[in-house]
Amino acid sequence: MTLGPGRRELLSRAEERARLRQLMADARQGRSGVLVVRGEPGIGKSALLEEAVADAEGMTVLRATAIEMEAELAFAGLGELVRPVLHLIDRLPSTQASALRTALTLEEGRAPDTLTLGAATLTLLTDAAAASPVLVAVDDGHWMDEAGAQALLFAFRRLQAEAVAVLVTARDGEDCRFTQAGLPSVTLTGLGPAAAAELVQSVTDMPAYGESFKRLYRETAGNPLALLEAAPALHDAEGSAHAPDGPLPVGPRLTTAYSARLAGLPEAGRRAVTVAAAGFTEEAAVLTAALDQLDLDAEVLRVLEATHVIERSGGRVRFVHPLLRAAAYHMAGAEQRREAHRALAGALAGRTGPVDRDQRSWHLAAAAAAPDRTAASALVDTAVRARDRGALPAAVRAYERAAGLSADPVDRGRHLLAAAEVAQLAGREEQALTLAEAATNATDDAAVCAGATGLRGQILLLRRPPRRVHDQLVGIAAELEAVQAVPLLVGAAAAACMGGAIGQARVTADRASALACHGEASAFEHPAALMRAHTMMLAGQRGEAAAVFDSCEKYLTTTDPLSIGVEATSFSAMDLMWLERFPAARTLLERAILCAREIGASERLVPYLTVLADTQLRTGCWDEAYALAGEGAALAAEIGQPVLEAYAVSTSARIEAARGRAEKCSEHARRFRELIEGRGAELVSPYMEAALGLLELGTGKDSEAAARLHDLQRQVAASGLREPTVLQHQPDLIEACLAAGDDSGAQAALDELTDQVRQAPSAWGHAVSARCRGLVHSDEDAYVEALRHHERLPDPYARARTELAYGRFLRRRRKRGAARRPLVAARQVFERLRADPWTALAERELRAAGFETPTRPGREPVVLTERETQVAVLVAKGHTNREVAAALFLSDKTVEYHLGHIYTKLRIRSRVELAGRLAVDAHIPA
């Protein structure tokens, strides 16, 4: 990099400039990098960015400078940044293209969710980098609107193998998403004495080691802008009677110094500079029109330009430094600021573009000194547009400000409720609770109060102990009409289920279902019935639940799964899975996932992915289950769904436990506990205990497994859970008790399992209870019966466990020839599933029976990372790189990068080979 004119303040920035050189060199070599440059105002952040832009020869430069007033305008910064590459949007996957066009007001469409919009931004950057390396330069990132910053952060975190360099500047002490995101950063400090002296001498002839310079350096701490502002004044006054005795204009005092400079402008100049500072845009035409509204001649801009307050270029008007803008706005009185906003609103009155209309709305709001129906109405329109574009934080602020400008209590309550609903969608539960409470305090309107109450119930379900939430929702529902009460009761039943109060959930679900059969509440008939069926399943009433699903089959198979609701769809899929209607569960979930992906509803993907992972685990598709669970956990972490993340993590842990991956399973167990601690999710926590018990059983820690699983069984019994297919831990408990020498404990657990299966018969229940009867009573007929039941169950692991137990029984009865067949079959399944501890047990039994266990011919197994596993599974199913990238919210280049590693590890060269090898050789991470 070479120093540009007027950039001498970079003389002592050798280390930072070296990092920038490396960042850009990496991009030119196809490697991505991100750097956030932090520091106080005037420290040289923008100068460093300018040098990077000047040195970006041969690169596509995507640049945005955020300004303070634009923070209310959704996607203003993102739109400015990607403007040079908008022609590439047509190349994006259709869902991503639609999301980005909607966000940037290029078309009207469904509100894009955060992840899809972030993925669209990522794909656009990487597509641009396919033509030439890209420099993304964001100046004053602390002022970028929140929605745009979220999209960019999503993309920045996922840059890996793309030719993209990212440089963001941000001011210390400001609330900034870029500095809080954990991105690589460097903090600029003041210049050293020698560099400071050289900079000062570029504008004065002040001696480098005189007392004036020592004072200047001491008080400025080497801040370049402060040095340049203070040095001339201090030098001119040196030795005179007017030498400044007070503090020099440093740090926050720079604004005061700028205010003093602006105060010397003529009145027309001061009014004009206030208008310029109040604008949401740097567009010269808007500023000129606003000045016309105040009968100010546009020639006044020449005065501002001559006094180095603004600079004009390419139809834009910019302040020479952001601090000057702040000083110009805040030095003006309240009425002068309102005058400026009224003028800007008038200048935009004839424009019909959505961005112009949003700017006008905020100007009308800023111009209002009292409640103003026109401004409030305009802001509601802005809020709706922001919500429809996926700019949820901007929509919340617009609704909230509209409420503040509304004199009518009902209007105020409606706007606050709308703000609360959007805040919840944005994941801001605390803010949503505050706004919902404010809505009920603003008005006694029944619709507003009911809506606010229901919203609070939904939020509290994930934030407070579920049983307490159940009681609160039931109490609220008692005061409402049926049509308003039914959704609350359904939510209350879900809360009770999550809290492990199955009996309580059943009573509440029955009440909801009864109310939903009459009048307007009949619109909730099917959701209420499905929730009732869910509580039946958990209570062990399989027959009754199956009858409900038979009556709701048409509803589930013909209704858009997204319109049914996330809870109804995911709970129904769970129930179908437990009912062993695996094709129906898989079809429902895959339809829901497809619909969610098609419209970019990524926030709804998490429960569908996690339940589908569980379904695939129970049907022997472990690699796909592991990939789905990993994807679900990553998405849940991204959008803040801790309980669902915990469920997904527990599914991964169960696979790791069966495969003997103790370190990874324990790591997931720690993460699981962090996620559910204090949440009262009593029906979720058993999943991890079951996984850990299986791990201990498979790795020879029989006593530990028996103790853990005994405790789990007591917890499950206390919750009222009577359906053994939910956790599937009881066969492990019985086997662990026998291995630990606790025959009476094994018999008691068998009696309980047998009783549950008698009340709620299932293929899995009959198979494993018969297996356990064979284990406890050494009953050969029981093993034969178990294998007969396994014929109706697509769970190869469960069958292999039975075959292993049967083969061991036959070997101990000295029926070695008969033992070989079930032992070999068990070994083959365990080996295919890579259930290493169980493979070892089967091989040990085969050797004890006198049979050789030759190693499988071929290459040594290899280890794929979690992300590589997700990519491999999708590619093996026939998806293109772009489809995989869209599904996993990655870039094409990153998928290509992972695929290259997969091919190298597996020593293959094609997708066909991958599809053939994935289920045979590739190990999930240890």
Image: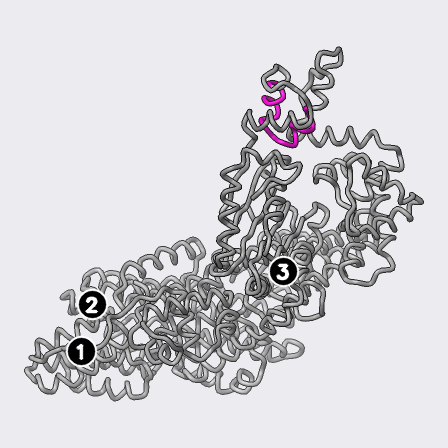
Where residue 289 sits: x, y (%)?
A: 88, 51
Disc number for residue 805: 1
- Count of numbered circles in the view: 3
Is residue 447 visible to the viewer in this orientation of the structure?
Answer: yes
| Marks 3 and 2, the one that precedes in the sequence | 3
Residue named by callout 3: 453
Q: CA distance from mark 3 to mark 2?
A: 48 Å
Q: In the image, is residue 170 part of the stretch drawn in magenta?
A: no
Where residue 107 sits: x, y (%)?
A: 71, 69
Q: Nearer the viewer, mark 3 or mark 2?
A: 2
Where residue 241 sits: x, y (%)?
A: 75, 10
Q: Where are the magenta residues, as a range?
A: 214-231
Residue named by callout 2: 736
Left or right relative to 294: residue 641 = left
Please state which amino acid type lies under the numbered disc 1. Answer: Ala
Query: Which residue occupies 69% across, 15% down?
Result: 245
